[in-house]
Amino acid sequence: MSVMAVPKFERFFREAASLDVDKSDIKRYSDFVNEEIYDLLLVGQATARANGRDVLERWDLPITKGLQESVHRFRRMDQDVELQPILDELAARPQLDVTLSEEATGRLPEIAGGVSVALAQAFRLLDTKLENPSSEHWERAFQLFRLLM
C-alpha cells in the first residue's frame, strides 16, 4: 500500500473500531486481507467445480452471515479505503482453475472491506480497552480468523 494511503488506513480503523494503527501495521493488514480473500476464492473454486462449472459465481463464495453483516457495515462507512493494492496482490497469486464471473470479481472490494471491518472489530472483542494494537494483538486476531474462516 502506498504511503499516501496511510491516512486512509488510519482513519478507517478509527472509524471501524476506535483504534489507532500506524504505518507499520499496513503490511500485516494488507497481507492478512489478501490471504483471507484468496482463501475464500479457493473455497469458491471448489464449490464451482463441485457443481460442474468452470466459472466461479458470486454465490460460490463462502460468505457467512457475520461476514455479510461486516460488508453491510463497510458499505455504510463513509470511507474511501484503498483496497486496490490488495486486489492487485490477488492477481499476483497462482491462478485459479476457474474463471471469476464479472459479478464475483465486482464483489471482491466489498468483501475485502467486510473482512477489514470484521478484523477491526475483532480487536475490540479481544481487548475492549485496546487503543493501539501491538504485534501480539494482530497475531491473536489473525488466529481467530484462521480458526473461524
Image (cartoon, helix red, strand yellow):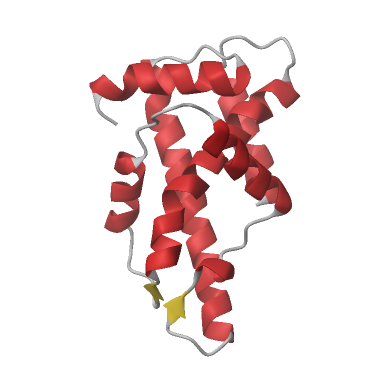
- Give the image quarter of residue 98: bottom left
Q: Position of residue 14 (x, y in %)?
A: 53, 16
Q: Residue at x 53, y 38 (%)?
A: 75
| Numbered circles on residues, count | 0
Relative to 25, residue 1 above or below: below
The answer to whether residue 92 is left or right of residue 19 is: left
Q: Residue at x 44, y 27 (%)?
A: 79
Q: Position of residue 89 (x, y in %)?
A: 31, 48
Q: Position of residue 22 (x, y in %)?
A: 42, 14
- Give the image quarter of residue 60: bottom right
* Quadrant of the frame with the N terminus: top left
Q: Nearer the viewer, residue 94 or 60?
A: 60
Q: Residue at x 33, y 19 (%)?
A: 6
Relative to 33, residue 137 above or below: above
Q: Nearer the viewer, residue 111 or 131?
A: 111
Q: Nearer the viewer, residue 120 or 135?
A: 120
Q: Position of residue 105 (x, y in %)?
A: 39, 61
